[in-house]
Image (spheres, grey):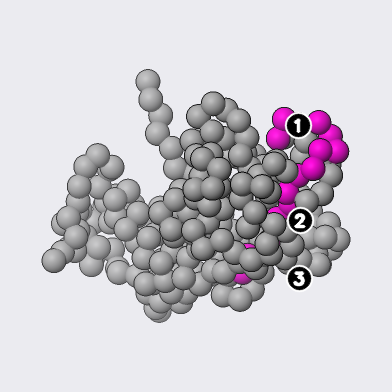
Amino acid sequence: MSPQVQRPDPPYMQVVKHIKAEIESGALREGQKIDSVRTISAKWKISLATATKVVGALKAEGLVRSEPGVGTIVTRDQAAASAKDRVVRSLDGKIYAANERAEIKSAELVPAPEEVADALGIPAGSRVIRRQRVTFRDDIPSSASTSWFRGELADTAPMLLEAKRLPQGTPKYIEERAGLAAAAGKDQLRADIASEEDSAALGIPLGSPVLRKQNWVLTTEGDVIEFGQSVSVARRWTTYNYEISR
């Protein structure tokens, strides 16, 4: 059955989301051609102008690029998932794309550094859980991240102290074990250069350009469930979609 345009998303955005989901799931892999503008137009019953807008949006997100003599292909410079994307995907049990995987490098109780204590709203030096991971795309390190949690979660969610992935994802595990449901979040990003720690984790030269992020996952009451810090290699877009209400 041919796909059909539905509301309320604009027609072009519905097609963009469909193709993006195919890329993230691995149905469309790196180097593989996506449908041409004419094929998209015919398949989705939209105008050529709208189909052209679809391909332009995918290019703008770094998901595809034009290859002379070939067409439009999926590119390895794919968009890095935002913290919001990770939380939402984990609640559905779909955390990583087909060509992604994560390795938990450490999970332990440590004294909270001042910036982490401030972010979690606790006194500096309090015991906190630190989970460090490296994410790989096509077996190449693409980002390194650290998640911080209040130390008391070690009693109710003990697997946070195990250096292995949580099959259902961290937010879902914490909700199941501690009853803390993710309801809101905040992300911050800045351009930076790779530190010695970044260089070692990602296998990039010291001083390379990187995108540094930090994020908060909050309950409905505004309490911090998780504070995250991460760094991504260059040439990857981070995309945020949002609605503007008036």
Give the Cα separation between the discs numbered 2 and 1. Answer: 18 Å
Please identify, in this view, whether the residue under mark 3 or under mark 1 is nearer the observer. 1
Among the two numbered marks 2 and 1 on one chain, the one whose residue lies closer to the N terminus: 2
Q: Are marks 2 and 1 in contact (CB under 8 Å)?
A: no
Q: What numbered label is drawn on residue 203?
A: 3
How many numbered marks appear? 3
- Quadrant of the frame with the C terminus: top left
Could you say which is closer to the camera, residue 101 or residue 187? Answer: 101
Q: Which residue matches tag 1?
A: 122
Identify the element where label 3 is drawn.
loop
In depth, the one of 140 and 224 nearer the eye is 224
Three-letter amino acid code of the residue under disc 2: Glu
Q: Residue 37 at x, y = what percent?
A: 28, 63
Q: Is residue 1 magenta?
A: no
Which residue is found at the position 69% from the left and 64% from the top? Answer: 163
Residue at horizontal 20%, vertical 47%?
6
Q: Earlier in the sequence, mark 3 or mark 1?
A: 1
Numbered range of the magenta stretch: 120-136
| Amino acid at circle 3 | Gly
Q: Secondary structure at mark 2?
A: strand
Q: Which residue is mark 2?
A: 108
Q: Earlier in the sequence, mark 2 or mark 3?
A: 2
Q: Determine whether, in the image, residue 233 is placed left or right of residue 176.
A: right
Residue placed furthest toward the top: 246
> How far from the left and from the top, in percent, is residue 228?
67, 46
> Residue 19 is drawn in which quadrant?
bottom left
Are circles 2 and 3 on residues that touch, CB within 8 Å? Answer: no
Separation of disc 2 and disc 3 at Cα?
24 Å
Residue 135 in magenta? yes
Quarter placement of the N terminus: bottom left
Q: Secondary structure at mark 1?
A: loop
